[in-house]
Image: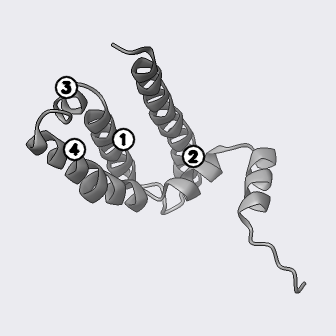
Amino acid sequence: MNFSIGLMRLVIVGLIVLIGTLYWRGWQRLRRSGAPLATGARLSLLVNSLLLFLLATLPPLYTLSHSLLYARALQKIMVAMVAAPLFWLACPVHVILCGLSFAWRQQILVWLRPARWAG
């Protein structure tokens, strides 16, 4: 196995774990406050989408996709047509922001807010 491929797999798994952890913290905080955004269905959507991303980017499907067209097509369908819509249906940005501390939330919201030059 090439070092860069192993490093890329480690980065992918790390990002998925980070997103899942931050989402879990936000989901728990919203659930305790009784917000309608924190439903079990949204949590299961996020978990399923993250599992599909992992399945598509890790062996054996990733290694098979270099030699089999069918595996490559299955990989693209999993990521683009199933995992991505499930991910966005889980409202990850809203829930993750609720899981962050107030200072981090303020910094991210300032960065996301569009600049208004007209005042």
Mark 4 residue element: helix
Amino acid type, mark 1: Leu
> Mark 1 near mark 2, Cβ–Cβ under 8 Å?
no
The image shows residue 7 at horizontal and vertical percentages of: 47, 20
Residue that carries the numbered disc 1 in the rendered image: 50
Graded by Cα atoms within 10 Å as few (under 14), some (14 to 19) or many (20 or more), the crowding at tag 4 reads many
Q: Residue at x 59, y 46 (%)?
A: 29
Cα gap from disc 4 to disc 1, whole angstroms: 14 Å
Graded by Cα atoms within 10 Å as few (under 14), some (14 to 19) or many (20 or more), the crowding at tag 3 reads few
Q: Say the numbered circle drawn on residue 60.
A: 3
First in sequence, mark 3 or 4: give its number. 3
* Image quadrant occupied by the N terminus: top left
Give the answer, above or below, for where 113 lies relative to 38. below
Give the answer, above or below, for where 19 lies relative to 107. above
Residue that carries the numbered disc 2 in the rendered image: 26
Give the answer, above or below, for where 114 lies relative to 95. below
Amino acid type, mark 2: Gly
Amino acid type, mark 3: Pro
